[in-house]
Amino acid sequence: NAGVTQTPKFQVLKTGQSMTLQCAQDMNHNSMYWYRQDPGMGLRLIYYSASEGTTDKGEVPNGYNVSRLNKREFSLRLESAAPSQTSVYFCASRDPGTGVNEQFFGPGTRLTVL
Amino acid sequence: ELKVEQNPLFLSMQEGKNYTIYCNYSTTSDRLYWYRQDPGKSLESLFVLLSNGAVKQEGRLMASLDTKARLSTLHITAAVHDLSATYFCAASQGGSEKLVFGKGTKLTVNP
């Protein structure tokens, strides 16, 4: 049971390049999330998906798109990267059944945009 | 709109001392979460507090929730170096899918 996995772990992009961050979970969770973490800012929600086939904007969605490919996978795409998108990106999934609503986090992707 | 504030943001303490981190939230929240993050690592769940008066303890850490005051505390007892990390609280509102995080408290425990 790997939990939440993310690829890649590190990435350097030039301004204007595109890339997709991948996230997968094997815990049979319905809900999945993408956050970014910047120094002194805590975690801010970019997009989330309450179930397969649905996605919704979070606090900071501009410049990003997402795809909920199936129940396991939720990807984050940067179409034209900007230096302001330099950050650490975390994917998370949520346990649906216990009522606790605890979120479990992946290891993160460190992205630098030059 | 739910907002979460933590204080202090930075905390340097000596081994063996006690201290408390505070987490205030702005509107009614039905759940409060505490996470730990080590440098360069992901977030690890510490506590989930589900009701007013809830108290949970794990080792030298104890978390409590006062929903009337909209306040959660994370109390550290007899700190040790291994507790050095950043601690985040997060709240959710009314069954919302979304968590709102505080900015984190960076704790450094000095020998």
Image: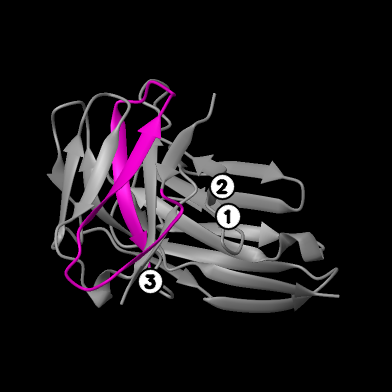
Q: Amino acid at mark 3?
A: Met
**Could you tell me which chain the residue with mark 1 belongs to?**
B
The overriding secondary structure of the stretch rendered in magenta is strand
The stretch of residues the image draws in magenta is: A8-37
Q: Amino acid at mark 1?
A: Arg
Residue B95 seen: no
Q: Which residue is under mark 1?
A: B36
Relative image position of residue A62 (x, y in whole percent)? 13, 62
Q: Amino acid at mark 2?
A: Glu
Q: Which residue is under mark 3?
A: A41
Q: Residue at x 49, y 31 (%)?
A: A3
- Image vertical order of residue B90 relative to residue A41, above or below: above
Report crowding for label 3: few under 14, some 14 to 19, many 20 or more residues within 10 A (C-alpha).
few
Residue closest to the eye, B53 or B7: B7
Q: Which residue is under mark 2?
A: B44
Q: Quadrant of the N terminus of chain A?
A: top right
Label 2: which secondary element:
strand
